[in-house]
Amino acid sequence: MQNLKKKKIEAHETKPKGNNEDSQLEEFFLNALEDIYWAEKHLIKAIPKMIKATTTEELRKVFEEHLEVTKEQATKLETVFELIGEKAQAKKCKAMEGLTKEAESIIEETNEGSLTRDVGLIMAAQKVEHYEIATYGTLVRLATAIGRQDAADIFATILDEEKEADMTLTGVAENNINLEATHEAKV
Ligand code: FE
Ligand code: FE
Ligand code: ZN
Ligand code: FE
């Protein structure tokens, strides 16, 4: 925080007024990139736990596929770091940490082999996807604003992948799991 403040003042002193806001925005952009990079890397560790916990093969396949997509997304973000001439660095995303903790709680609170477990896992996964959709949507606009169309294009690709994952999860829930889970007895 101290550093940030100092940098802000320096920018104000050395740059003309018009550029001052640009430098703050660029710094904000880099922070947001480091945050989502941490989130994607964290998901690479968290999704396997969700895969293991699934009841239906249908949901397991969706998670397995998104794990591979997520690994590629982390690589795509490394490309963005390269493009802007920064070292790929991860900064803890408290939101994603919380969302994956919630997924773990859901696993603990539901019975192994139950469809209710899958309903819970879908909810947890969709919360993750929605967080990512919000983040990448902003990153597309941010990258465009600071004149990095090359980065904006990569974020737009990832944004589409997250939206697709979200829709696929809705499909799985609507297809059968939610309906069948309503017949499931309490244990
Ligand atoms: Fe992702
Ligand atoms: Fe974040
Ligand atoms: Zn965060
Ligand atoms: Fe995702």
Image (cartoon, grey):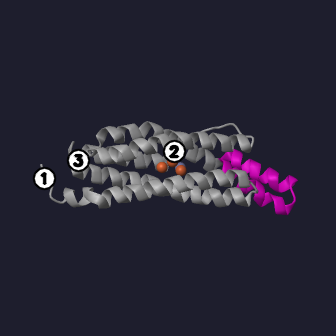
Residue 134 location, x and y as percent?
A: 53, 59
The residue indicated by pointer 2 is 39
Residue 76 as seen in the image, left or right of residue 4: left
Q: Is residue 161 above or below residue 92?
A: below
Number of numbered markers = 3
The foreground one among 37 and 83 is 83
The magenta segment: 1-30
Residue sitting at x 34%, y 43%: 60
Q: CB of residue at label 1: within 8 Å of ligand 4?
A: no
Residue 54 location, x and y as percent?
A: 29, 43
Q: Amino acid at mark 2?
A: Ala
Residue 72 location, x and y as percent?
A: 55, 41
The foreground one among 9 and 89 is 89
Gap between marks 2 and 1 measured at Cα? 35 Å
Residue sitting at x 64%, y 40%: 78
Residue sitting at x 38%, y 55%: 169
